[in-house]
Image (spheres, rainbow, N blue to C red):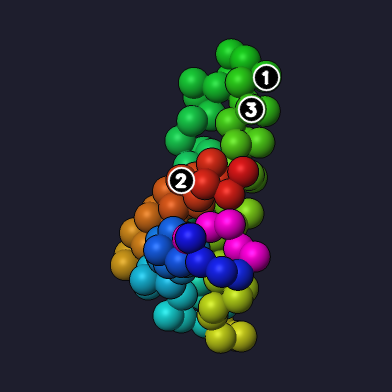
Amino acid sequence: MNNNSDPVSPELRKVEESIDNFYKKNGLTKVQFGTAVFNFLAYCEQEILKDIPSLATSLQLEGAKISELINSINYPIQWLLNTCKPGGSALYTDKLYRNSSSMLSLGESYIPFVC
């Protein structure tokens, strides 16, 4: 145990920092904010739209799916805001779209880690 007031070991803090910064490896963080968010939200929209036929039978299920998506995009949007340079445009690329998929998965995985 260290002598400072932090009850968490330095090793564990290092692991925590690594997890907290893992998103920075995603390609979306390397482009301007507007371009990153356009591609990310386009991907998220597609995720909702692909489930609509199966959700049509239950309004509650549809609401739950949308609520889950909104919760899952919170951290990724914050990460992009904190790391991307300002500016950008509605420029779609397949690579950024694929990066959006991983970014959404990261956001979903991060929620239990911080809660």
Is mark 2 in CB contact (under 8 Å) with mark 1? no
SS at badge 3: helix
Is 81 situated above or below 20?
A: below
The label shown at residue 59 is: 1
Q: Residue at x 53, y 29 (%)?
A: 52
Write the residue at 42% across / 80% down: 30
Residue 107 vs 19, above or below: the answer is above
Disc on the earlier residue, 2 or 3: 3
Q: Is mark 2 in CB contact (under 8 Å) with mark 3?
A: no
Residue 49 seen in this snapshot: yes
| Relative image position of residue 18 (x, y in whole percent) | 41, 66
Q: Earlier in the sequence, mark 2 or mark 1?
A: 1
Q: Tell me which segment is drawn in magenta.
A: 5-9
Labels 3 and 1: the sequence-earlier one: 1
Amino acid type, mark 2: Ser
- Where, quadrant-wise, is the C terminus in this rendering? top right
- Distance of label 3 from label 1 (alpha carbons): 9 Å
How far across and down, in percent of the image, does residue 89 sit? 55, 79
Graded by Cα atoms within 10 Å as few (under 14), some (14 to 19) or many (20 or more), the crowding at tag 1 reads few
Q: Secondary structure at mark 2?
A: helix
Task: Locate residue 40, reporting x and y percent.
Answer: 50, 60
Residue behind mark 2: 109
Q: Amino acid at mark 3?
A: Ala
* Viewer-side residue, 65 vs 82: 82
At 53% from the left and 57% from the top, the residue drawn is 8
Q: Which residue is mark 3?
A: 64
Residue 67 falls inside the magenta stretch: no
- The majority secondary structure of the magenta stretch comes to loop
| Closer-to-camera residue (80/6) | 6
In this rendering, the count of numbered labels is 3
Looking at the rendered structure, the secondary structure element under dot 1 is helix
